[in-house]
Amino acid sequence: MVLAGVWTELTDLVLPAECAGCRAERLPLRQGVCPACADALRALRPAPVRPTPAPQGLPGCVALGSYQGVLRDSLLSYKERGRHGLARPLGRLLAEVVAEAVGERRPVLLVPVPATARAVRARHGDHLRRLARHSAARLRAAGWPVAVTHPLRAVPRPDSATLDSVGRAAAARDAFRLRAGRVGAVRRIAAGRLVVLLDDIVTTGVTLAAVTRRLESAGIPVYAAAVLAATVRRGRA
């Protein structure tokens, strides 16, 4: 991997005695997963992904792996089962994806896709903000000039899990707003940096395309998107 040692240096955390990846109990855990699941995550390699069909405005996208197996279960444990301690190892793995998307050590501005207020309440915090913080820390430790900004807010919208592709596109189209008074500051921060969007999962790509259009309409060009998982039905490029 570009940023070696994501798992090897990690120590055990005081977490529930259930592996976040395979949900087996009474196993030794490293950052919430058993050694076998840690090995499975460590073996993943970031690669380009592209939904079919790709929505207009979708930037180039790189994912750590397919949304299945240990990666899927670890993400579900983190997002839906309250395993917030997984933010650190998952964020560090997301840093690998950013490094692959950019290709060489260059100044980067990370922009996590914002969550709705409802999702933040349900998950006791913004899961992507946590991932972005740990991803940035990992990149900085490897010598990357990295900044993180949050120029957008998410407006209420239907749960994407209940929608088909047409419904997702309609919901995403007006799902984000620029934060008042932030555009000028973000433009200054973005100057000389590559803007990389962060998300946990890409399915149809409409969310990433909507965020890209909103930023670029404000004069903030997006270079790429980095995600942890791509849904299996959409496949790899």
Image (spheres, grey):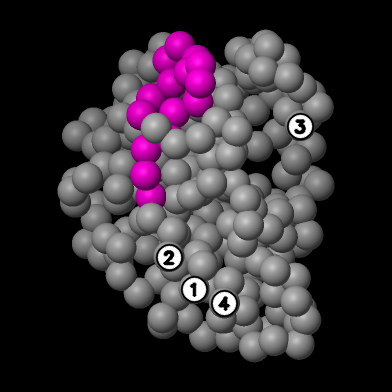
Identify the residue at horizontal 75%, vertical 70% (top origin). 23
Residues in magenta, as a range: 46-61
Density class for disc 3 (Cα within 10 Å; few <14, some 14-19, many ≥20) is few
Which residue is nearer to you in this view: 41 or 169?
A: 41
Instruction: Give the vertical position of 213 relative to 132 (above or below).
Output: above
Question: What amino acid is at disc 2?
Answer: Ala
Residues at marks 4 and 3, CA–CA distance in whole angstroms: 30 Å
- The residue under label 4 is 36
Question: What amino acid is at disc 1?
Answer: Asp
Residues at marks 2 and 4, CA–CA distance in whole angstroms: 11 Å
Q: Secondary structure at mark 4?
A: helix
Left or right: 2, with 88 as reference point = left
Residue 58 lies in the magenta-colored region: yes
State if disc 2 and disc 1 touch (CB < 8 Å): yes
Q: Secondary structure at mark 1?
A: helix
Density class for disc 4 (Cα within 10 Å; few <14, some 14-19, many ≥20) is some
Density class for disc 2 (Cα within 10 Å; few <14, some 14-19, many ≥20) is few
State if disc 4 and disc 1 touch (CB < 8 Å): yes
Q: Quadrant of residue 81?
A: bottom right
Q: Secondary structure at mark 3?
A: helix
- The residue under label 1 is 39
Left or right: 35, with 157 as reference point = left
**Between discs 4 and 3, the one toward the N terminus:** 4
Question: Which numbered mark, 4 or 3, is in the foreground of this view?
Answer: 4
Tag shown at residue 115:
none
Instruction: Give the vertical position of 197 relative to 205 (above or below).
Output: below
- The residue under label 2 is 43
- The residue under label 3 is 161
Question: What amino acid is at disc 4?
Answer: Ala
Q: Could you tell me residue 168's position as x and y percent?
A: 68, 19
